[in-house]
């Protein structure tokens, strides 16, 4: 990146959130921009609540083309947009801002970015029957995407059933023909059979060895596990791998949504964005951190 960093003719792209010091987004996005030969630099800054609106209003005046938005500002960003993509409208949240022609355009690339990153390891036919653990913001993006892309059956497992029921009602309002069921976390092992895809969306296991669900004693053949946590092997991914499952961690979603954001800003086809190179760069850093800290 050194040859790019010191140029004076670069437009900027940003990550806005709090905190952002740990983020891999600058590495991922600048890797792609360098490979594409684009005159952009991607930067990250931590923003206080009281300053978020002013920052979004100021960035275009400084020549910024767009910004990614992460925790805790996706709902705030949604309210600041003059135009919203269909995905952002449905999800009520924005993770990508595009500053264009004096307007702020809002997009949500989380769900489709995750979907695209599943790749050939989990073919579309295997995604028709899914079991999703959690009911938070990431879960909403995953569930909307699964059903909008042709999913037929969806089971949502959560500790607080009322929160999962609210998500179910929201989903059925948009996809009335879908089969959506809410179950407690304790039902996980009993429900595994017959599911082509399991998605773990909670933060449980990020900092310890806990699992959000009981660990199974067997894993059905052709059932793919997508774990949104990255940077460590969780108890669930370890058990599933031991039982022969194909597992993908959260780097796929991180890079997938980043690639779609980049395609919006550059106005290029998603297939033009070097997703595999972005993923390789992120994986190298994560592996190095794991060696250093033993996670």
Image (tube, rainbow, N blue to C red):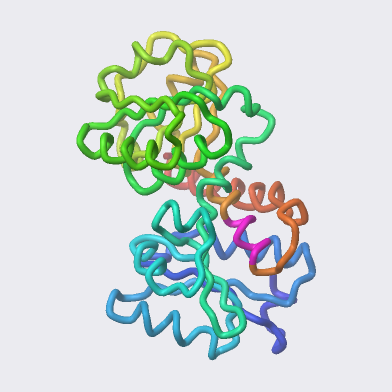
Residue occupying image coordinates x 55% and y 43%: 114
In front here: 88 or 188?
A: 88
Residue 260 is left or right of residue 84, and the answer is right
- In the rendered image, residue 216, in percent from the top left (x then y), is placed at 37, 14
Q: Which residues are magenta?
A: 258-264
Q: Is residue 259 magenta?
A: yes
Considering only vertical position in the picture, is 182 above or below 173?
A: above
Quadrant the C terminus occupies: top left
Residue name at image x 38 percent, y 41 percent? 173
Position of 50 relative to 28 (above/below): below
Q: Position of residue 178 (x, y in %)?
A: 45, 29
Reply yes or no: does residue 227 show up in magenta.
no
Residue nearer the viewer, 176 or 214: 176
Image quadrant where residue 156 sits: top left
Look at the magenta stretch and give its main secondary structure. helix
Is residue 94 rendered to the left or right of residue 262? left
How far across and down, in percent of the image, does residue 107 sit? 52, 61
Dividing the picture into quarters, in which one does residue 39 lie? bottom right
């Amino acid at each position: 990146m050194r040859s790019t960093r010191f140029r004076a003719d670069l437009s900027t792209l940003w990550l806005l959130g709090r905190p952002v010091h740990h983020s891999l987004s600058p590495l991922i996005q600048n890797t792609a921009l360098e490979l594409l030969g684009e005159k952009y630099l991607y930067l990250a800054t931590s923003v206080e609540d009281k300053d978020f609106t002013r920052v979004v209003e100021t960035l275009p005046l400084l020549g910024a083309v767009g910004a990614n938005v992460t925790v805790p500002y996706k709902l705030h960003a949604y309210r600041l947009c003059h135009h919203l993509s269909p995905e952002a409208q449905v999800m009520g949240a924005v993770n990508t801002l595009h500053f264009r022609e004096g307007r702020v355009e809002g997009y949500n690339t989380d769900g489709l970015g995750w979907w695209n990153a599943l790749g050939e390891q989990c073919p579309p036919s295997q995604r028709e029957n899914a079991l999703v653990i959690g009911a938070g913001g990431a879960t909403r993006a995953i569930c909307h995407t699964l059903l909008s892309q042709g999913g037929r059956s969806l089971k949502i497992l959560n500790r607080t059933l009322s929160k999962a029921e609210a998500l179910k009602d929201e989903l059925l309002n948009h996809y009335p023909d879908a089969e959506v069921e809410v179950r407690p976390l304790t039902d996980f092992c009993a429900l595994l059979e017959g599911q082509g895809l399991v998605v773990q969306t909670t933060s449980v296991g990020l900092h310890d060895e806990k699992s959000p669900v009981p660990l199974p004693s067997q894993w059905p053949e052709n059932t793919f596990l997508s774990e949104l946590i990255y940077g460590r092997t969780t108890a669930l991914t370890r058990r599933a791998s031991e039982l022969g499952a194909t597992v993908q961690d959260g780097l796929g979603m991180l890079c997938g949504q980043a690639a779609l954001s980049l395609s919006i800003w550059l106005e290029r086809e998603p297939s033009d964005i070097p997703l595999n190179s972005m993923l390789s760069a992120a994986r190298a850093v994560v592996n190095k951190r794991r060696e250093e800290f033993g996670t």
